Amino acid sequence: MSAFIWTKNWCEKNSTPHITYDEIGSTNVEAKRANLTQAEMTVFLARKQLVGKGRGKNSWLDTGEDCMLSSWALPLKSAPSLIFPPLAGLAVHKSLSKIFDKETFGLKPPNDLFSSKGKVAGILIEVASQGDKHRAVIGLGVNVLSAPEVEGAACLSDSSTLSEDLWSDFLTHLAGEFEKLTKNPSSLSPEAKQELIKAFNQTDDKYQDIDDQGNLTLKDGSQIKWENL
């Protein structure tokens, strides 16, 4: 079994544009370097990542092809809106919750996804722009079949019996959610706002509201800006 092979097979079966690497520094770096003329969502996929990127100065640790080490490049007509990052996290959360429905998942702002066992995924969103062409790069690392030996890490197989078919169902749902983001929504629907707050509170029950700029209101009345997380 290999999360890398499963994901590669899914891309080929669904004719999803993709570029694969046996070994690469960072899929996000490669996705940002790629030609901006690509008009379709493209998946950059690595068997092994040497310099996996996390938010700020953090790095993403992985266990090679047991994990999905990927970047999803989404073409946009304008630079990503302020609400794009929270919605990207929600897209992953919804897909995990839909397919692995015997598990409960939480979304820790700004970029971590947790199961009841621990951290199973991380997201890093970056932007590539060239004139009037824009691309959102959603770096997504998922511990599928195993997790790195660090405190708090977990994998999907800790609580679910995984198969290639089940993983393919997850990718299909995720691709559909990411495709919605290519419209680059600038505001949150009431439903999305409710879903985000519920997902946040699964990891830390302190969130009350989120506005269209990504500002979070806590239950104690204080506010946190998304970029300050």
Image (cartoon, rainbow, N blue to C red):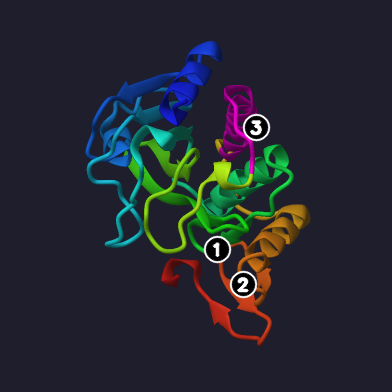
Q: Pick whichever of labels 3 and 2 is earlier in the sequence.
A: 3
**Mark 2: amino acid:** Asp
191 lies above or below 142? below
Q: Residue at x 60, y 55 (%)?
A: 115
Image: magenta residue range: 160-181
| Quadrant for the C terminus in the image | bottom left
Q: Looking at the rendering, which quadrant does residue 137 occupy?
A: top left
Residue on which the image places disc 3:
173
Q: Residue at x 33, y 30 (%)?
A: 47
Q: Secondary structure at mark 2?
A: loop
| Residue at mark 2 to residue at mark 1: CA–CA distance | 8 Å
Residue 140 location in percent, x, y?
44, 43
Residue 159 location in percent, x, y?
63, 47
Residue 180 seen anywhere in this rendered image of the structure: yes
Q: Secondary structure at mark 3?
A: helix
Residue on which the image places disc 1:
108
Marks 2 & 1, CB-CB < 8 Å contact: yes
Depth check, front residue: 228 or 115? 115
| Residue at mark 1 to residue at mark 3: CA–CA distance | 21 Å
88 lies above or below 195? above
**Mark 1: amino acid:** Lys
Q: Residue at x 44, y 27 (%)?
A: 2
Q: Secondary structure at mark 1?
A: strand
Residue 131 seen anywhere in this rendered image of the structure: no
128 left or right of 193? left
67 lies above or below 226? above
Residue on which the image places disc 2:
204
- The circle on residue 227 is none
Packing grade of label 1 (10 A; few <14, some 14-19, many >=20) is some
**Mark 3: amino acid:** His
| Residue at mark 3 to residue at mark 2: CA–CA distance | 26 Å
